Each structure stands twice: as C-alpha cells, then as structure tokens.
Image (cartoon, rainbow, N blue to C red):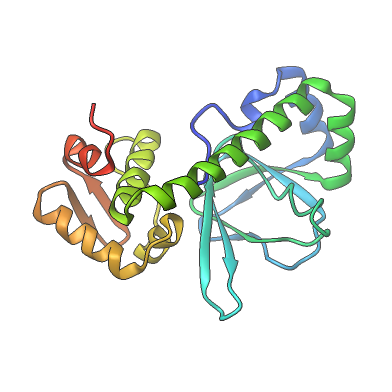
Amino acid sequence: MQGMGPGQGFWTLLSKNDQDALTALGRIRVFPAGATMCTEGEPTTHVFILVTGWVKILAVTNDGRELMLALRGQGDIVGEIAGVAGGFRTATVEAVDAVRALIVVYDRFGSFLDSHPGAARAYRQVMTLRWNDAASTLRSHALASGSQRLARLLLELTDWYGTVAAGTMPLSQDELASLVGMSRATVTRALSNWRARGFVKTGQRHITILDLAGLRKVAGQER
C-alpha cells in the first residue's frame, strides 16, 4: 500500500519553528467524512498538510472505472505533485474520516521550502520514501501472490489502527482490490477462505483480524 507509517509524514518531520512558519502561511479547514477535498483535472492552487484524519487518493480510468491509488494520513502532504506535473490535479482526494488540514497556496509552499532548509530536507525525505514505497509495491506485485499482498495490506492497517483493520476506515472490497492490484473476485475468495480458517471476521465495509499469526503466515511474514 502506498502510504507512510506513523511518525513519517512531512508535518511530523518539521521542527516546531518550521511548523509555526508554515501554519502562518495557510489556513486550517475541517472536512467531514466523505467530503471531496479536490477533484482530478481541476487547476492546482494549494497543497494540503493533514493535521488529523485520513484520505483516499482516487483516479478514474479511461473506461470510467474509479481506482484507489493510495491512503494518506496524519502528517502527510497531499496535492503537491500536481503543481509540478502540469498544474492540474492528477487525482481526487476524498476524506475517509473527519480531516483537519492545513491548506497552503502552492506558490507560498514552494517559497517556504526555498527559505527553510530543514523543511526542504524533510520534503525530499518524504518524496524519497514515497518513491521507494512505489518501487516496493511494483516488486511485490511481481513476486507476491494476490492473497499475500492483501494479507500484507490488512497487517499494515492493523499496525496503524490496532486489532481492527479495515473496519477502522470504511474501505470496500473494490477499494482493497485496487490498492493491492487484484480483482474484486479474488479479494472476495481470499476473505472467504480466511473467514473459514478463523483468520478474519467480515461485515459491511468492516474487517476484523482474529488471528494475526495466521495472517502473517499467509503474508510470508512469520515472526
């Protein structure tokens, strides 16, 4: 899954002085769960720094299918790439739960990085980690089975949210499939198999992991 672990987000890497300086350049806005924060194709005017909450990064294919590309959470920066890549949003950002975000005009954000070396280093670190994460995802798709990738995703969610995995954030089976590069039918079969083996319990947009050790074995992450 493309997303950074707790404590690795851009905001959390900034010094208190840099956080204060960046806050002074923007404004705080709260988005309710399900709100669309920006839409693919619209002009880029600002970046979002997620103070609290989680968002989905979504894109639409040429045949009209919606894909979930990534999750971003507390401390992450969102929407910064579009300002470089042509000036238009490359994806839609939707709030998963209540999101409190610092909104900074794109040009001001660039000037902030130019004048704050520590923040610029933090930004480069975040971008490097994202590229590494994307490369790891590609390797995983080539070397791991669909079931392994799904198990690893659920374990990542568990690391972030506790024993309740996808139940903490309302992810559909279609979205889970999109995140790990599987078909929905394959996700359904894997979850059915894991329910029968007592690894998980599922409900409407809700998955609870009952047997972490069993799921780690499926993922190839035995401890």
Camera-nearest residue between 80 and 38:
80
Position of 221 relative to 148 (above/below):
above
Residue 167 makes an appearance in the image: no
| Left or right position of 115 against 77 | right
Query: Where does the image place residue 156, in percent across and percent down from the top left?
Result: 38, 39
Q: Quadrant of residue 90?
A: bottom right
Residue at x 83%, y 46% (from the top left corner): 105
Number of numbered labels in the structure image: 0
| Left or right position of 54 against 27 | left
Camera-nearest residue between 27 and 189:
189
Query: Where does the image place residue 35, in percent across and percent down from the top left?
Result: 57, 60
Residue at x 34%, y 43% (from the top left corner): 152
Position of 173 relative to 81 (above/below):
below
Residue at x 29%, y 65% (from the top left corner): 186
Q: Quadrant of residue 157?
A: top left
Query: Where does the image place residue 124, in percent across and percent down from the top left?
Result: 72, 31
Quadrant (top left, top right, bottom left, bottom right) of the C terminus: top left
Residue 193 makes an appearance in the image: yes
Residue at x 84%, y 36% (from the top left corner): 25
Query: Where does the image place residue 146, in percent across and percent down from the top left?
Result: 33, 56
Q: Residue furthest bottom?
A: 63
| Left or right position of 59 against 29 | left
